[in-house]
Amino acid sequence: MRRVLTTPMAQREQFHIVPFTAAQMFDLVADIETYPAFVPYCTGLRVLRRKGEPETAEITAQMIVQYKIFREQFKCRVQLDQPNLTIHVDYVEGPIRTLKNRWRFTDLAEGGSRVDFAIDFEFKSFVLQQLSNRVFDKAFTHMSDAFVTRAHALYTPTIRTA
């Protein structure tokens, strides 16, 4: 008898209300080459291919992530859709079974914007998945907050926040 160990895929969704325009936030997230400078756990990123117009480009990138003693490299495809203010990231190859990121940016009537971020991922390795599940919430929050922090460093708020 053979038993297959499976782990539930890690899935999280979060949104931020920020004092910046949806276009500014889209541009910040779309600038993937800068991720190693501010995204936690991202220690390297190399664009392998870019095709299409800048507003609707499809980018294939190699990313290196590191957390303590774990260092992994994987390839992903980033689909930019500037007219609809969305970004989709799909896994291509590496130690992960599944990886999907979804970003949606929406301007708010009172100013600023809403940034929706969702991630689904699962490692191929049962051990890595179990370890990642333990720190996933903290890592997810750090990663999503990093984009807001970066926006404050780059842009002038369009509205005042409390």
Image: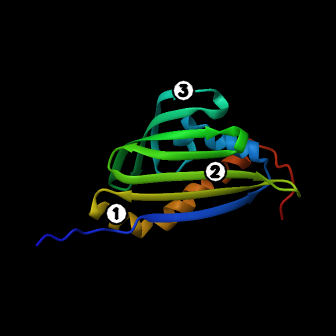
Q: Residue at x 43, y 58 (%)?
A: 121
For badge 1, the amino acid type reads: Gln
For residue 126, above or below residue 24: below
The residue that label 1 is drawn on is 129
Q: Residue at x 66, y 47 (%)?
A: 150
Determine whether, in the image, residue 136 is placed left or right of residue 69: right
Which mark lies nearer to you, 2 or 1? 1
Image quarter where the C terminus lies is bottom right
For badge 2, the amino acid type reads: Phe
CB contact under 8 Å: marks 1 and 3: no
The residue that label 3 is drawn on is 51
Quadrant location of residue 116?
bottom right
For badge 3, the amino acid type reads: Lys
Residue 147 numbered mark, or none: 2
Disc 2 versus disc 1: distance between alpha carbons?
A: 25 Å
Residue lying at the far left in this picture: please name it. Answer: 1
Pick the residue in front: 61 or 45. Answer: 61
Q: Residues within 10 Å of mark 1 (few under 14, many from 20)?
A: many
